[in-house]
Amino acid sequence: MHNYKLTKIKNNFIDNSLKDVRKTIRSELNGIKNIIKKGDSIAIAVGSRGIDNLQLTIKEVVDFVIKQGGDPFIIPAMGSHGGATAEGQAKVLAGYGITEHSIGAPVRSSMDVAELPQGELKHRIFMDKIAYNSAGVILINKIKPHTDFHSTYESGLVKMAVIGLGKEYGAKAIHNHGVYGLTQLIPASATQIFATHKILAGIALIENAYDKTMKIKAIPGNEIMSEEPELLKIAHANRPTFPVEKIDVLLIDRMGKNISGVGIDTNIIGRTKIYGQEEPSSPNIRSIVVRDLTDESHGNATGIGLADIITRKLYAKIDFDITYKNISTSSFLERGKIPFVAETDHDAMNLALRNCGNANPGEERIIRIMDTLHLDELYVSETILNELRGNLQIEIIDSTVDLFDEKNAINHF
């Protein structure tokens, strides 16, 4: 049995996370307190992405609305995620600890939509009917580079207003036009949506390379489209990266919807798998192995096609109904294709190296990560370790270990 020697290192990114998140949220909310009138029924829109301090943020927004005399409730704003069912979307929120009991406001999940005026646009525009019938909506979302496309608006409040709040109908209206829909129709649709004045405000969160909250900004609804592009630049400048460009095998312990909207962050691995989109030039990864699917994904393996090899353990967790609903809505079918399924982790690693042309023992360029959210601690093979010696950002934090134990099982991260 061939084993692989890896050394655990720390990639010391700049730690600019907020020291007092609650204080920052309250300060930001104080700047928009005039948006709510006494007795207003306020919909607080929450998506399906894992966000640092999400529960705390929602709770603070709920308390803020109540303090202003409003009547807050939570709505899922996640397009077709959660199997495109009201029950499924409520379950996604519950998986993040967002329930009436924990937040202090009811969760009202529905797939019913209201159709909005489309002006001169040729496609239809929708909004969650419960949200539309409320006095106004407060969006809560993370601003970050998108995993499907790059444009003025990517993952954030603007996209949530169009696709997230639009439910399955809104998601399809945009995704039916592929990348053009994402880059061109989202801003055009958002202009129509914000013109209804239903979006009272947005709470934008930005995370640093440690996946920790580094910035929170409360933005009045009519300023979101002008403010978000600058926030996106900040998010892009603070994203994590690998310490080297060339990797033979990237071993990822887990993927999932709570890790990235597409399971594996395409901005990290340098793969997009969208027809008509040029693949990123960096990093250069020959083989990607994914070992497991997070429980928080509820079987949604969207993005599985970004990998070359998966384990039987991961494959057994896939709920194809939920996964295919999500992928068919996006129309990016390459991401739903099943990679080679290896029976064991060891089989997966051997096959991955064969896919690279079988590097000489000891010369393999291997990196192991927990997931694409966490690149601060990773395992690297000897060849990569030697390249990083002298790099002041890199710290060796553990001795060299075997990837597999005596029973051929992979050692814990």
Image (tube, rainbow, N blue to C red):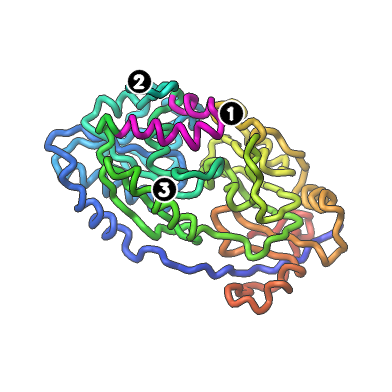
Camera-side residue: 389 or 272?
272
* Figure check: 9 above or below 292: below
Mark 2: secondary structure:
strand
Please name the amino acid that badge 1 sits on.
Ser
Answer with left or right where residue 85 lies relative to residue 359.
left
Residue stretch rendered in magenta on the structure: 170-194
Specify which label sits upstream in the sequence, 1 or 3.
3
Please name the amino acid that badge 3 sits on.
Lys
Real-space CA distance between mark 1 and mark 3, rounded to the nearest whole angstrom: 23 Å
Real-space CA distance between mark 1 and mark 2, rounded to the nearest whole angstrom: 22 Å
* Figure check: 119 above or below 345: above
Camera-side residue: 271 or 383?
271
Q: Which mark is residue 331?
A: 1
Q: Do the residues labelled 3 and 2 touch (CB within 8 Å)?
A: no
In percent of width and height, residue 343 lies at 77, 42
Mark 1: secondary structure:
loop
In percent of width and height, residue 304 lies at 65, 39
Residue on which disc 3 sits: 142
